[in-house]
Image (cartoon, rainbow, N blue to C red):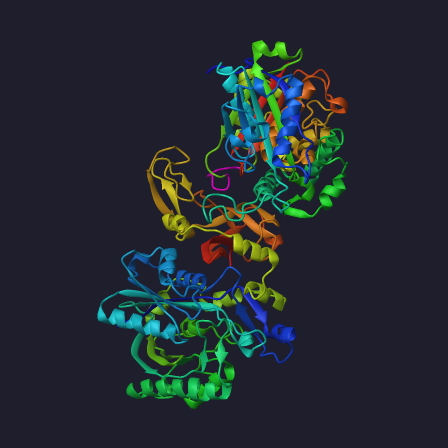
């Protein structure tokens, strides 16, 4: 039976306490903390990170399709899924698609993936969902939103959770929206938004799928319900006769926040981390309607390789001390220096396209004659000068350490001094890159690092993606 | 391979005042350096048969020299080889003369760095959009300091002593950009530019130009009684950015070693510490001078600190290094530096270096190191 074969998640390392948001603007704190994407992260980089978490120990060649779901893709016109596929080193003959426009895009992509697998058009479909939505400054949204990503590998066999049924309804409603001109999320009056949007619609879909499967609330071991805030979430759970304490997956509101399209995938990942074989689960996503799923965990759960998932990412965090850091990271205010860089920054689509094996897939070249590994890919070997006698190797699979570094105040960047590093991988390749999410006094020669896919600089309408090093999370 | 030794002579040199020359144009700098060289050699523009001009970004083609000097009809080639541009222009001019094609030629290097509106050399160089992201000059050399500190257990104090020495030497040269003494404590407390390098570990950005008139060695005495002869010329380029180069140790540069070996072999130098009277080396940052002294064979790899502590490279030491204050005191108008260094070696060999004069000068070395870095050039001059 088609189902979830693997899961992964990504939560940015930065957390901002809601008390600090309340302090910055005055007013009430929603308590707890929210995740904040780093200044070099966006929905594409987070989706890639969650996808790598999900594909841990898997054969990437077995993936036949990749879906990317988000309401905050950095591109309005240009596919994100094809970038993520290149980052993951997936095959070229796969089907890629973006799902957008609704908070339901994550579960819609999941449903489409299941349909593809059931129809036989694909054996394995990787579904990624990521969001980095902006609440207007001083709004409740600014406190309630969080940034993150989830990934699910949907396949025809060896599922860790089989999907027994899927049921959706469509609802036209302008409750939460952004026009193509809007930077911040808009809401109609919240009481109506919850009552006739989220609550009524999700309840209708859940009731529908339960009824047609002859299920009572008590049959569900874990109800994974998305929700904009804990109060509405708990009210919905109670109305559906679920015990919020025992049956309902925690919303991760106090630790992450509402991650939009990524929320249902992330919550399902969190539920699967705790599930036992035979557990029946309900998944419900909301946004302009609702998608619902009945799943059943299998024995295969126990044989999944280790991954960070939700738990691992939750425990690895750093606190942002001040709201001003959030403002900087989201680019809400720009310094004169940053503006100068943005306006003068040039890139080259052709140069990046020619070298995307190294730029996006982090491929180096390993000489078949003398074994020297170089990065980026070199046609003539540095070690023995043989020409075109190399195979490409993916350096993200290798452990790395800092060979040397500097803390550069002249290099620009959002948080100078910018740590610049020369990384040596296990095979001896050297990668010159920025280090991200490191405290300056953390840098040491020989410190172990991992490579993380990020934005490196943007300007003149162009976003440059590349890899950075970071202290192992 | 033949040797360049004693085939070419330097018969005149000129060097502008180095500094923040706000009121001086690129053309003015070129005129200032060239006419001092003409006067020194006793020649005029009509005597030049060819010229090589070095600049990394302050001018284009041979025209950037022809225009200000109104050189008419002679071959002029622009040379660009990162920070080794100036010395490589000189090197090319020497070979042009040595092969017999020209009797008298000029090499001139210049750079106007104070017209950019920025205090440093800038960021993010390179041909590819992301491979060299945020590469800066101090950052590139900070990589060496970090690794060298890690390997040999020295700290910033050794580097500070190099800055103090070069600032002191600069006070003895009226053309130096900086004319003030500094203390080790000031160097250690200076704001950090690219850790571990602070402001006073870095050379400033500066405007300047310098020029040499060279001729066939057998004609030199016709122009002056004390010409200086070219004894060796070396140039070496390393493949791949140091940051990407597999196995690169970040303790020194093979291009330095190779360029020096070429020049030493031509000149017959076996023990540079004993045989050289003075050395002008590319101290763009304090750490650079330390590793260059090792790469050029003045001392063993890893022993730089002992020699800095012992004063080996001071004006009074066994081998004065950067007697005029080096890049630290003169600044680094990129195309000009190699010829400015050669100007000091030339003056020292003629015993015209005033308060900086080294005793009994016989052989002097000038050296450029350029890029992230990847290219080194060495010139040996003697009586």
Instruction: Judge whether residue B243 is colored magenta.
Output: yes
**Residue B326 vertical placement versus A239 (above, below):** above
Residue B186, quarter of the rendered image: top right
**Residue A223 vertical placement versus A470 (above, below):** below
Position in image of residue A335 (x %, y %) = 60, 59
- Residue A27 in view in this figure: yes
* Image label count: 0
Please provide the residue range marked out in magenta: B242-249
- Residue A438 in view in this figure: no
Position in image of residue A191 (x %, y %) = 50, 88
Q: What residue occupies the far left of the structure in this picture? A: A120
Q: Nearer the viewer, residue A426 or B227?
A: B227
Instruction: Please identify the dominant SS of the magenta region.
Output: loop
Instruction: Judge whether residue A28 is colored magenta.
Output: no
Residue B339 is left or right of residue A303, and the answer is right
Q: Nearer the viewer, residue A109 or B137?
A: B137
For the point 22% across and 68% down, the residue is A120
Residue B344 is left or right of residue A300, and the answer is right
Quadrant of the rendering where the N terminus of chain A is positioned: bottom left
Residue B24 is left or right of residue B101, and the answer is right
Residue B149, quarter of the rendered image: top right
Position in image of residue A456 (x %, y %) = 49, 54
Position in image of residue A401 (x %, y %) = 51, 48
């Amino acid at each position: 039976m088609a189902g979830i074969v693997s899961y992964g998640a990504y939560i940015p390392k930065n957390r901002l306490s809601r008390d600090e948001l309340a302090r910055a603007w005055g007013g009430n704190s929603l308590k707890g903390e929210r995740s904040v994407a780093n200044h070099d992260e966006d929905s594409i980089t987070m989706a890639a990170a969650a996808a790598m978490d999900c594909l841990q120990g898997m054969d990437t060649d077995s993936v036949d399709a990749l879906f990317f779901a988000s309401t905050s893709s950095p591109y309005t016109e240009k596919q994100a899924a094809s970038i993520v596929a290149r980052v993951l080193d997936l095959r070229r003959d796969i089907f890629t698609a973006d799902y957008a426009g609704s908070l339901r895009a994550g579960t819609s992509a999941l449903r489409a993936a299941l349909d593809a697998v059931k129809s036989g058009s694909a054996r394995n479909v990787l579904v990624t969902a990521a969001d980095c939505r902006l609440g207007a400054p001083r709004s409740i949204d600014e406190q309630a939103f969080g940034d993150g990503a989830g990934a699910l590998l949907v396949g025809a066999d060896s599922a860790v959770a089989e999907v027994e049924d899927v049921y959706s309804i469509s609802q036209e409603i302008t409750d939460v929206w952004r026009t193509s001109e809007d930077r911040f999320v808009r809401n109609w009056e919240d009481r109506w938004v919850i009552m006739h949007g989220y609550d009524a619609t999700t309840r209708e879909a859940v009731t529908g799928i339960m009824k047609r499967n002859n299920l009572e609330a008590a049959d569900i071991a874990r109800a994974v319900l998305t929700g904009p805030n804990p109060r509405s979430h708990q009210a919905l759970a109670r109305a559906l006769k679920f015990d919020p304490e025992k049956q309902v997956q925690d919303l991760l509101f106090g630790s992450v926040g509402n991650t939009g399209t990524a929320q249902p995938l992330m919550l399902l990942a969190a539920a699967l981390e705790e599930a036992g074989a035979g557990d029946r689960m309900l998944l419900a996503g909301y946004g302009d309607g609702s998608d619902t799923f009945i799943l059943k965990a299998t024995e295969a759960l126990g044989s999944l390789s280790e991954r960070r998932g939700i738990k691992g990412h939750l425990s690895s965090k750093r606190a942002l001390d001040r709201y001003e850091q959030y403002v900087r990271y989201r680019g809400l205010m720009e310094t004169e220096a940053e503006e100068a860089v943005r306006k003068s920054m040039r890139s080259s689509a052709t140069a990046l396209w020619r070298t995307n094996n190294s730029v996006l897939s982090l491929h180096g070249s390993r000489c078949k004659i003398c074994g020297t590994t170089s990065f980026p890919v070199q046609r003539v070997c540095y070690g023995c000068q043989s020409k075109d006698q190399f195979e490409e190797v993916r350096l993200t699979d290798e452990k790395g350490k800092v060979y040397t570094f500097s803390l550069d105040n002249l290099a620009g960047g959002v948080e100078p001094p910018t740590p610049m590093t020369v990384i040596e991988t296990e095979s001896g390749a050297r990668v010159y890159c920025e280090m991200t999410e490191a405290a300056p006094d953390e840098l040491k020669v020989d410190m172990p690092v991992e490579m993380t896919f990020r934005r490196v600089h943007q300007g003149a309408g162009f976003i440059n993606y590349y890899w950075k090093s970071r202290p192992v999370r | 391979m033949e040797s360049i030794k004693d085939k070419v002579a330097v018969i005149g040199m000129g060097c502008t005042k180095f500094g923040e020359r706000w009121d001086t144009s690129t053309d003015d700098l070129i005129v200032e350096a060239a006419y001092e060289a003409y006067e020194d050699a006793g020649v005029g523009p009509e005597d030049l048969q060819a010229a090589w001009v070095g600049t990394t970004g302050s001018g284009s083609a041979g025209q950037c020299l022809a225009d200000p000097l109104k050189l008419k009809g002679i071959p002029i080639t622009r040379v660009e080889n990162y920070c080794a541009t100036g010395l490589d222009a000189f090197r090319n001019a020497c070979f042009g003369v040595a092969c017999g094609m020209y009797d008298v030629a000029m090499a001139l290097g210049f750079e106007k760095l104070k017209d950019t509106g920025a205090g440093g050399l800038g960021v993010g160089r390179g041909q590819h959009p992301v491979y060299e992201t945020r590469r800066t000059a101090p950052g590139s050399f900070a990589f060496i300091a970090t690794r060298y500190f890690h390997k040999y257990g020295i700290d910033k104090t050794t580097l500070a002593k190099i800055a103090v020495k070069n600032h002191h030497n600069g006070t003895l040269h009226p053309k130096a950009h900086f004319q003030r003494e500094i203390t080790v404590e000031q160097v250690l407390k200076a704001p950090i530019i690219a850790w571990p390098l602070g402001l006073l570990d870095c050379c400033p950005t500066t405007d300047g130009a310098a020029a040499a008139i060279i001729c066939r060695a057998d004609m030199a005495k016709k122009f002056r009684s004390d010409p200086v002869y070219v004894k060796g010329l070396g140039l070496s380029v390393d493949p791949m950015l140091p940051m990407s180069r597999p196995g690169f140790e970040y303790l020194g540069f093979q291009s330095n070693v190779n360029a020096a070996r070429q020049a030493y072999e031509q000149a017959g130098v076996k023990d540079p510490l004993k045989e050289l009277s003075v050395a002008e080396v590319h101290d763009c940052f304090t750490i650079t001078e330390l590793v260059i002294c090792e790469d050029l064979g003045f001392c063993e790899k890893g022993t730089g600190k002992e020699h800095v502590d012992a004063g080996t490279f001071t004006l009074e030491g066994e081998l004065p290094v950067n007697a005029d204050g080096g890049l630290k005191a003169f600044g680094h108008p990129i195309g000009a530096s190699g010829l400015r260094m050669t100007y000091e070696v030339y003056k020292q060999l003629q015993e015209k270096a005033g308060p900086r004069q080294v005793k009994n000068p016989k052989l002097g070395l000038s050296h450029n190191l350029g890029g992230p870095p990847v290219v080194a050039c060495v010139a040996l001059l003697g009586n």
